Image (cartoon, rainbow, N blue to C red):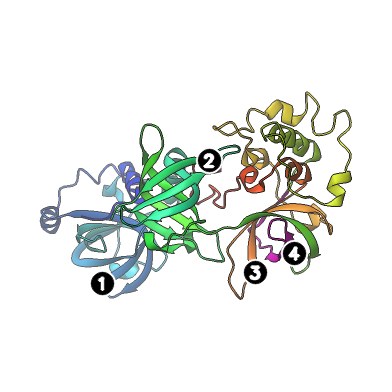
Amino acid sequence: MQKRSAAVVIIWALFVLFAGTSTLCPSGSEARAQATTIAKSIGKIKTINGSTITLSPTSGWDIAVSVQPNARILRLMPGDKDLKNATPLQLQDLQVGDTIRARGAGSDDGKTISAVEIIVITSSAVAAVTDQVRQDWQRRGMGGIVDSVDAATATIHISVPRTGAKREVDVQTSKNTVIRRYAADSARPENAKPATIAEIRAGDQLRARGNRNADGSKLDAEEIYVGFFPQFSAIVKSIDANAGTLSLQDLSSKKTVEVRVTPESQLQKIPAEAAQGFAATLKSMVPQGLGGAPTSTAARESPSPAGSAAGTSPPNGPMARGSRAARMNGGGPNLQQLISGLPSGSLQDLNLHKGDAVLILATEGTSSTPKAVIRLLSGVEPILRAAPSASDAMMLSPWSLGGAPGGEASQ
């Protein structure tokens, strides 16, 4: 039977909009196909070689679609919901990059379809389905850091970081689980490649989508995205704004790290008042006797905002109003929520100087390519003073819901 990833199942819902599809009587070839296994897959055409199409689905591996001689090929006009009004096409009308739905007899391994029907999908329909997929990641997604992998039971043990305590979850995989690994120099899901559970390592960040048990301690994964995305606190050593590169000193390892800013990098600055209020909330949860991370000289000497005591914000300040919203379900402050409404600017906008403290989320990088900045936060000195572990406080997700996996840990 064809492999059914969660994304593909949701995409099939798109064709509920096409009222005529389920009521049309099958042709002789379709009836024969239905006697075996009907398979459906939606994706973009990767290659066309004669009557064989290589289809790249939203999730999972590429599929070889063999278009049968009597297959019907149709294009629906934007907004149309009835196949009776569809425009017939010929195989030679299809082009690489078109989004199609292929339907026909599928192989047991889900890698081939003998197609008796091809429907070309409009961009508006694709956008509607993309939104459905995004919402499903929000609803059934969960993410965290990989602690270990049990190959014998096909189980991935992850920890969902929380301030003060970790939540442990078992992510159960099966032969039908779609696993993709992010490229070392990209956080874009479209650049992720099919992978196996054997490629998942401790320390990886993982997002999985599927059904959870009653107490949330186990998730039966239908789809997994995994990658290594370093996140660390650092002090700025030097900046080349023209080249878009920074030289940083990692506060934990004391090593120099080179990072590069790309057009997709999110560069944000937390307002001083909000950072002070967040730090106060965070500090109240840290056991006495635990010190914060080292920060720059400027941070240690910076005065408190007018009208507030050191380490606090005014009663009616933004953190006072939003302190409950800035907490995670586990009771800890959630930096992701704090920064969700901050604008993203350029290096020039941040006006960084040598000695400033920053929080960084980056790609893994390669031997020839520096780490690419996914998110850089400045104005974080008060937070670093309050947090014994910046990684617990950060909760910076590499996967924006603008087209990539998300879930509990990124909310």
Amino acid on which the number 3 mark rests in the picture: Pro
Residue 74 image offset from top left, x and y in percent: 29, 57
Do the residues bearing badges 3 and 1 touch, measured as CB atoms within 8 Å?
A: no
Between disc 1 and disc 2, the foreground one is: 2
Q: Which residue is mark 1?
A: 51
Question: In the rendered view of the protein, which quadrant contains the N terminus?
Answer: bottom left
Q: Which residue is mark 2?
A: 166
Q: CA distance from mark 3 to mark 4?
A: 10 Å
Spatial distance from mark 4 to mark 2, Cα to Cα? 32 Å
Q: Which residue is mark 3?
A: 370
Above/below status of 409 relative to 308: below
Q: Mark 2 touching mark 3, by CB under 8 A? A: no
- For marks 4 and 1, the one nearer the N-term is 1
Quick one: 172 or 365, which is closer to the camera? 172
Q: CA distance from mark 3 to mark 1?
A: 43 Å
Residue at x 84% of width, y 47% of height: 299
Q: In this orientation, which residue lies closer to the viewer: 234 or 49?
A: 234
Which mark lies nearer to you, 4 or 2? 2
Asked if residue 132 can be seen in this view, the reply is: no
